[in-house]
Amino acid sequence: MRILSRRVVLAAMIAALGFGQASAELLARLDRFAQSFRGVTADIHTTNHVAGINEDEQESGRIALRRDSPGKIRMSISITGPNASTVVLHDQTAQIYHPKIDEFQEYDIRQYKDIAQQLFQLGFGVAGSELAKSYTIAILKREVVNQEDTTFVELVPKSADLRKRLSKVTLWISDKTNCAIRQKFDFPDGGYRLAEFSHLLVNPNIPSSSFALPKSAHRVRVN
């Protein structure tokens, strides 16, 4: 029995050492990639699962994310179809444009600026050292997604305040691009948001016009 117990403990120690090494390698890889990352464009398909009523909302569109300077990004997500809309995030402001009524709602997000930028960048150029500050790596393994080799990593927020809003984040990071080709946010109420990315380009030329909304549109300040 003692021999068996020692073997179990030894196996656990070896597994822990392997996990720690794999985590360190992933974080170092993301640190290197972050130094050259300037932006990304991709097609996006999202599934928003609403807890309680057990319904899924599907949306497709295009995403553009550009890093203007360290810690400062611009991002645009344009959704097509019957509920077409465009979300633009820049500095302390988030705007949601509704083309059917030619109106955009403007939100002041300065209180949540750091969290918002961090969440939107997860899997897209965030340095491993920054990731380690805010999240604990709970699961790390290899996985093939759509015939592409990826690193599956499950992240748990270290901030108790953030965990009230976000239970965990799961990323599938491509070996080829070092960017997420799948991203999942799990919420405490059982809901989640799953995003899948395709036709992804790293460091393309993204003009400022990609983040501009029609000047003629009616603007509504929400807060």
Image (cartoon, rainbow, N blue to C red):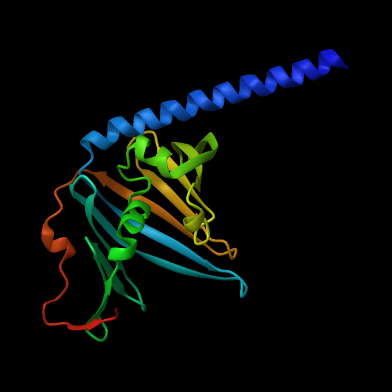
Residue 48, position as x, y percentages in the image: 48, 66
Which image quarter: residue 85? bottom left
Work out whether residue 43 or residue 31 is closer to the camera in this orientation and state it: 31
Q: Residue at x 48, y 63 (%)?
A: 47
Which image quarter: residue 107? bottom left
Quarter of the image with the C terminus is bottom left
Q: Residue at x 35, y 40 (%)?
A: 130
- Give the farthest residue toward the top: 3
Residue 193, position as x, y percentages in the image: 48, 61
- 153 over 78 or under it: above or below: above
Residue 6, position as x, y percentages in the image: 77, 16
Work out whether residue 33 or residue 175 is closer to the camera in this orientation and state it: 33
Residue 218, position as x, y percentages in the image: 18, 85
Q: Is residue 46 left or right of residue 176?
A: right
Task: Count how many numbered circles sit on residues in the image.
Answer: 0
Which image quarter: residue 179? top left
Q: Is residue 53 left or right of residue 160?
A: right
- 183 over 218 or under it: above or below: above
Q: Is residue 200 left or right of residue 215?
A: right
Q: Residue at x 15, y 67 (%)?
A: 212
Quarter of the image with the N terminus is top right
Work out whether residue 223 or residue 212 is closer to the camera in this orientation and state it: 223
Work out whether residue 217 or residue 14 is closer to the camera in this orientation and state it: 14
Q: Residue at x 21, y 60 (%)?
A: 91
- 141 over 168 or under it: above or below: above
